[in-house]
């Protein structure tokens, strides 16, 4: 499943012989959030450059699931959050996303 891990440089992480198996990320989450483990550093990349890396449900869920997975990985000592594309790191919420609201709110 190494092809589910894209590196911070865009390359597929094939695993490192000096490192344990790479963190496996659900293939559904690969598109909006990319993860690469390089030694004790996890590179997490927001990957919606066509939408200036704005948050939609898939990105929000993917990032939340990624944090949960990395938090319990004893190999990871630091996490670098970065973004793909060259126009913006992240513009916030995607204005086209209809955010679910709790019942009883208007």
Image: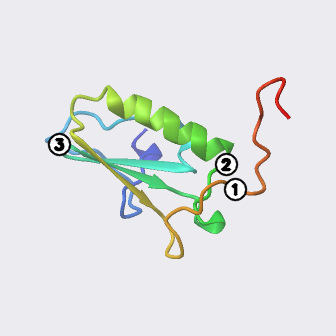
Q: Secondary structure at mark 3?
A: loop
Residue 47 makes an appearance in the image: yes
Q: Give the Cα distance between marks 3 and 1.
A: 40 Å
Q: Quadrant of residue 103?
A: top right
Crowd band around label 1 with a 10 angstrom C-alpha radius: few (<14), some (14–19), many (20+): some
Q: Quadrant of the N terminus?
A: top left
Q: Residues within 10 Å of mark 3 (few under 14, many from 20)?
A: few
Secondary structure under tag 2 reads: loop
Chain-order first, disc 2 or disc 3: 3
Q: Position of residue 58 (x, y in %)?
A: 64, 43
Q: Is residue 69 left or right of residue 76?
A: right
Residue at the image point whose x is 24% and y is 37% from the top: 76
| Label 2 sits on residue | 56
Q: Position of residue 62 (x, y in %)?
A: 55, 40
Drawn side of residue 21 relative to residue 95, left or right: left
Q: For the C terminus, give its image quadrant.
A: top right
Residue in view at x 21 percent, y 39 percent: 77
Q: Is residue 93 left or right of residue 22?
A: right
Residue to which mark 1 is pinned: 94
């Amino acid at each position: 499943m190494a092809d589910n891990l894209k590196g911070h440089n865009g390359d597929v992480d094939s695993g490192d012989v000096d490192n344990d198996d790479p963190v496996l990320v659900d293939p559904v989450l690969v598109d909006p959030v990319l993860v690469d483990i390089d030694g004790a550093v996890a590179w997490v990349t927001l990957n919606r450059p066509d939408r200036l890396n704005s948050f939609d449900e898939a990105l929000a869920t993917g990032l939340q699931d990624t944090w949960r997975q990395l938090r319990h990985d004893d190999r990871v000592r630091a996490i670098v959050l970065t973004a793909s594309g060259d126009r913006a790191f992240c513009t916030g919420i995607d204005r086209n996303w209809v955010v679910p609201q709790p019942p009883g709110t208007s």
